[in-house]
Image: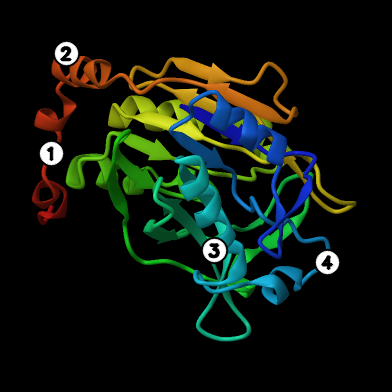
Amino acid sequence: MLFLINTDIDEVLISGTIFAISYPLFQEAASAGAKLLCFPENFSFVGDLEGESLKIAEPLDGPIMRGYCSLARESSIWLSLGGFQEKGSDDAHLRNTHVLIDDNGNIRSTYSKMHLFDVDVPGGAVYKESSFTEAGKDIVVADSPFGRLGLTVCYDLRFPELYQQLRFNHDAQVLLVPAAFTTVTGQAHWEILLRARAIETQCYVIAAAQAGKHNEERKSYGDTLIIDPWGTIVGRLSDRTSTGITVADIDFSLIDSVRAKMPVSKHRKPAEFWNRSV
């Protein structure tokens, strides 16, 4: 299995549509026998000016997603496309959507980012994602040859209850976290949060990350990581800001072993325990 990080982006014309992907890396992954390729948040577009994302937002049956479905089908690779600018319910909003495509080119699942990034980053910029983005409401898991996948996006990472739900209520084995973390928050918290989510859920965590300077106003921390259920990093680029792929296998026996030796699912208090009157 191979996973992608985007930095410098090549424009590739496929079936009449321009795709902002690093196509040589896609070819490299396919030729190496990849079965699942994970892209970061904002994989197809990072805006320079306010409002640009709204202007380019498309429905899931639009030309951009049709093109990626064709790529998946032609290469026989599953794609995790995190942070697609999906057209919202009105012209003032979009959805930050994680799209899972199977190796036949079919959209298997979509998840709309639940937690929106409305923050004033210390020493950084002010972000107001909710000003143009509709928050999702649904937890999403999908069965695949790589296990039961839990779909999330970026800022969701700071809310462990979502990941607890994915593991303990929806039986997830692999958690997907496409992201475009800021450099300030990434340096402080990125790896720590990812390893914590892996350890507490006893799941693999796959975090494809945007990296580097996108424009004069925006840059991302990078550091694509693959973490096993014991919290060990099993995939990482040597340079967190580089463009490239890192490789790891999903070991189902390790998932089973960690969960058997540390049976936290049996020891957790049920919801009614916490909801009871004091």
Whole-Å distance between the Cαs marked 2 and 3? 44 Å
* Residue at x-position 46% and y-position 20%: 248
Label 2 neighbour load within 10 Å: few <14, some 14-19, many 20+: few
Q: Disc 4 on helix, strand or loop?
A: loop
Label 1 neighbour load within 10 Å: few <14, some 14-19, many 20+: few
Q: Earlier in the sequence, mark 2 or mark 1?
A: 2
Q: Earlier in the sequence, mark 1 or mark 4?
A: 4
Whole-Å distance between the Cαs marked 4 and 2? 51 Å
Nearer the camera: disc 2 or disc 1: 2
Q: 161 or 34, which lies in front?
A: 34
Residue 24 in sight:
yes
The amino acid beneath tag 2 is: Lys
Nearer the camera: disc 1 or disc 4: 4
Which label number is shown at residue 49? 4
Whole-Å distance between the Cαs marked 3 and 4? 26 Å
Q: Which residue is mark 2?
A: 261
Q: 99 or 90, which lies in front?
A: 99
The amino acid beneath tag 3 is: Arg
Nearer the camera: disc 3 or disc 4: 3
Which label number is shown at residue 66? 3
Q: Position of residue 83 (x, y in %)?
A: 56, 55
Nearer the camera: disc 4 or disc 2: 4
Q: Earlier in the sequence, mark 3 or mark 4?
A: 4
Label 3–label 4 contact, CB within 8 A: no
User: Does residue 196 appear to the left or right of 31 in the view shown?
Assistant: left
Whole-Å distance between the Cαs marked 2 and 1? 18 Å
Q: Which residue is mark 1?
A: 269
The amino acid beneath tag 4 is: Leu
Whether 34 is drawn above or below 125: the answer is above
Label 2–label 1 contact, CB within 8 A: no
